[in-house]
Amino acid sequence: MIKGISYTMVFEAPALNHDDKLGGSVIPIKKIARPNGTYSYYSKQAIRHYLFTALNYFDNELWQEAPIALVGEEKKKKVIQFDFPEANIIEYPEIDLFGFMYTANENPTRKAPLGITRAIALEPWQGDTSFGANHDLVRRLNSQGSDNSENLATPDPFTKEENISLFKVTFTLDLCRFGYQECYFKNPPKKDSSKEKKLSAIEKIRNKLENMKRNKFAEASNFKNVKEKCSTCFYLERLEKEIEKIQPEKSKKATKGEKKDAVWTMICNSDGGNLGFVGEIQREKTMVCFIVTDEEKEKRLKSLIEVLTSGLILQVHEKADVNAQFKAISLLKVPVSVMHDAIVIDRMGRLSLDDLMYGIKNCYIQNIYLDIKPDMEKKMKEGFLEEPLREDKNKLDKFNDLNCPIDTKKIGEIVDLCLGKKPQEGQKEPTDG
């Protein structure tokens, strides 16, 4: 069973992710020191922003911005957060993919199923800087001003650190938690004598579901429908065992065909399509689980892979587009970014084919897809063949077999394998690496 998918890419770009100013007019780039040099990088938060921006551009209807709110007891301590349960994984793929933290109402949180590394430069920063000033604006302002020399504007000079490099970044998706979330809440007291009653988290969820039912965006359902529409959910078997534990004495009294179930609600979109289910299981604490349907999960996964393999928009103080020169998609037994450390450049600034093929041997990899631009591929092979004692060409032959374009058809194959569908004719079954 495939439990994770990892995408590693190498792209060339300027270092646009700037850090806090060192002085009044010096604009530094984000960088980190290593024993062999100083390397610029893009932070995880920046990469997350660029990815979601691209997803939102690509399919605004699917990747809508999740609602946010100011949360906190006091005005001074309020912070901006995603507004749970209005923002949930069923209605908003952003929450499903990137997770959230909520610091009120028993603190329900979601660890992001999508892991993102920093985008680290493969070539060291050489201390390059540029000097600039707003001469044109000064000229235009002075042309409108008086003849008094004391009132004339002067340029504002600034210094900016510069770097253009190859960067590597990896995205790793936990397919077991993708499209699934469970939360545990204390059962609210039956009677609340306080004058100003504050709704608990579970009460907010129940109120939301009732409002959705009144507006025809939700309806009562059962676990049978959940199993039918969410068959790829990794936790279905465990959920079934949890359901069997609730109120066992009542379950025994139930007649045949009326097995005791949790409370399930089906969530629909404006077109009446099924997006997912919310289940409430009463135990010592109330367990609430959110499950996205197989159909919706397939849309999200396909959209994500299409955007990652097609390119991102990097924009901070200036704009640059990312078109990967190297792409590697790994289907995994364990969701770990196995190929990230396999991306190394040699002394001539070329990606190391030896390190790449060593990384592919990782036993977590069930299937891998490489897509390398011809120029980079040529340089990798040149570097490989320049090494002495290259009589055995098996490694090079395997590299040639793995390298093929990751097009729409290939993405469809990858999505089918991730969701446990049978490969279509002509497609390969997952291998053990």
Image (spheres, rainbow, N blue to C red):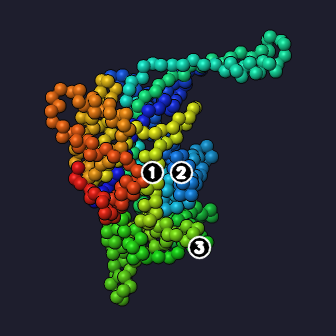
**Is 5 left or right of 218, judged from the image as shown?**
left
At mark 1, the secondary structure is helix
The residue at 51%/31% (across/down) is 16
Please provide percent x and percent y for residue 37: 36, 22
Q: Amino acid at mark 3?
A: Lys
Measured along the vertical axis of the image, is residue 17 above or below residue 252? above
Q: Amino acid at mark 2?
A: Phe
Q: Amino acid at mark 1?
A: Glu
Residue at label 1? Answer: 306
CB atoms at circles 3 and 2 under 8 Å apart?
A: no
Q: Nearer the viewer, mark 3 or mark 1?
A: 1
Q: Which comes sooner in the sequence, label 2 or label 1?
A: 2
- Examine the image and state in which quarter residue 376 appears: top left
At mark 3, the secondary structure is loop
Looking at the image, the residue that sits furthest to the top is 149
Q: Nearer the viewer, mark 3 or mark 2?
A: 2
Which numbered circle lies on residue 216?
3
Please provide percent x and percent y for residue 74: 60, 48
Please provide percent x and percent y for residue 431: 23, 54
The residue at 71%/15% (across/down) is 154
Q: Which comes sooner in the sequence, label 3 or label 1?
A: 3
For label 3, the crowd category at 10 Å Cα-Cα, with few meaning under 14, some 14 to 19 and many 20 or more, is: some
At mark 2, the secondary structure is helix
Q: Which comes sooner in the sequence, label 3 or label 2?
A: 2
Please provide percent x and percent y for residue 402: 28, 46
Which numbered circle lies on residue 58?
2
